[in-house]
Image (cartoon, rainbow, N blue to C red):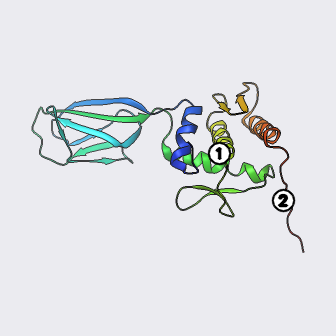
Amino acid sequence: MITNSVSDIIPVIRGLINDKNRIDGRDSYIFETDNKFRLIEDFINASTITVFVGGNQITTFTYDSDNNRVTITSALSADDTIIIRYNYYKKYSDTEVQGFLESALAYFPMYQYKKTFEVNNNDEIVAVNDLEPTINELYIIAQITSILIDPQNVRIAIPDLSMGAKRDMSDQEQIQMVFAHFKDYIGTFDIESPNRD
């Protein structure tokens, strides 16, 4: 079940934009003089990296995500065969997806929704009064995020609500449609007016 944790909602967003975790990352090298090995794929899940030297798995390596390189810190011999396996994403890094997610949260006050959401210091999506979003709100957040990332590649289906991208609509029109369908699903929005003294 999805929770308000950013790490829980990112896989839902990746599913909507068809950028799922790929497990077939495998690069091979022959060592000559440089113990740094650039990985072919760009969006690596660092915790899944395994390195083999001459067929034996080693743990003496580091991963530099800024340069997308594995550095082997143990001694290597000329002509050693290096195989590096990893999981990766084809389109976006987690940091990019989270950036889009945080942008998506701005649409709730724009459409005068009763809650304003933010990502707190624990990487959880919360309303500004520390209320957790409902599961339906989390799925709407995921859908808006996926529209911002790739407006022509979105489909969502949750209980009692199913929507797909309209190829002839802009991302802003699609987001407006999401809020209209969401309003129909939950009833009218409670509009908060500013307190004016």
The residue most toward the right is 197
Q: Viewer-proximal residue, 164 or 33?
A: 164
Residue 46 drawn at (x, y percent): 36, 44
The structure residue drawn at horizontal position 54% and vertical position 51%, both measured from the top left corner, is: 5
Question: Which image quadrant: the C terminus?
Answer: bottom right
Residue 151 drawn at (x, y percent): 67, 32
Residue of label 2: 192
Looking at the image, residue 95 sits to the left or right of residue 59; the answer is right
Q: Quadrant of residue 78?
A: top left
Observer able to see residue 167: yes
Q: Secondary structure at mark 1?
A: helix
Q: Viewer-proximal residue, 4 or 193?
A: 4
Q: Viewer-proximal residue, 140 or 52?
A: 140
Q: Quadrant of residue 56?
A: top left
Q: Nearer the viewer, mark 2 or mark 1?
A: 1
Kindly identify the amino acid type of the residue bearing the numbered disc 1: Ile
Looking at the image, residue 15 sits to the left or right of residue 38; the answer is right
The structure residue drawn at horizontal position 53% and vertical position 56%, both measured from the top left corner, is: 123
Q: Distance between the Cα atoms at labels 2 and 1? A: 22 Å
